[in-house]
Image (cartoon, rainbow, N blue to C red):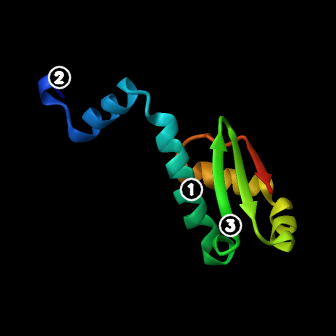
Amino acid sequence: MAKRTKDNLSISELLQEFVDTNKLQTGLDKVNVRDAWAKMMGNGVNNYTTAIQLERDTLYVQLSSSVLREELSYGKEKIITMLNESLGKDIIKKLVLR
């Protein structure tokens, strides 16, 4: 296959180059983590989720139910693994439930 030049880049390659050049990946990761949480955890958990914040490699999730917070705390490692698999890369190292 011929090597592509700047004139022959695909749209996805151009977008990735734009993201890299403007250092937008961390902002995109924050948005993608919120979407992954909503998709992976479902409506039952999302109804009690009041805030989701990614800071460096720690995901902070605020829940309005102390019972749900306690239940989710038992499966933190599994939740981290599921979210990272959904995102396609290891973004989250620690999960803090508030």
Location of the N terminus (image quadrant): top left
Q: Nearer the viewer, mark 3 or mark 2?
A: 3
Q: Earlier in the sequence, mark 3 or mark 2?
A: 2
Q: How many numbered badges does the structure rendering display?
A: 3
Q: Nearer the viewer, mark 1 or mark 2?
A: 1
Q: Is residue 4 above or below residue 58?
A: above
* Residue position marked by numbered label 2 in the rendering: 6
Instruction: Return the x and y of residue 34 as percentages of the image width and height.
Output: 56, 56
| Of residues 40 and 55, the one drawn nearer to the viewer in this rendering | 55
Residue under the point 70% across and 72% down: 48
Instruction: Return the x and y of residue 55 as percentages of the image width and height.
Output: 66, 39
Residue under the point 86% across and 61% down: 74
Q: Is residue 89 above or below residue 46?
A: above
* Residue position marked by numbered label 1 in the rendering: 34
Specify the amino acid type for callout 3. Thr
- Determine the CA span between mark 3 and mark 2: 44 Å
Q: Are dots 1 and 2 in contact, CB under 8 Å?
A: no
In the picture provided, is 65 more to the left or to the right than 86?
right
Q: Quadrant of residue 63?
A: bottom right
Residue count near mark 1 (Cα–Cα under 10 Å), binned few <14, some 14–19, many ≥20: some
- Determine the CA span between mark 1 and mark 3: 11 Å
Specify the amino acid type for callout 2. Lys
- Going by the picture, which residue comes out furthest to the left? 7
Look at the image and tell me whether residue 10 can be seen: yes
| Of residues 23 and 83, the one drawn nearer to the viewer in this rendering | 23
Q: Secondary structure at mark 3?
A: strand
* Residue position marked by numbered label 3 in the rendering: 49
Q: Earlier in the sequence, mark 1 or mark 2?
A: 2
Residue count near mark 3 (Cα–Cα under 10 Å), binned few <14, some 14–19, many ≥20: many
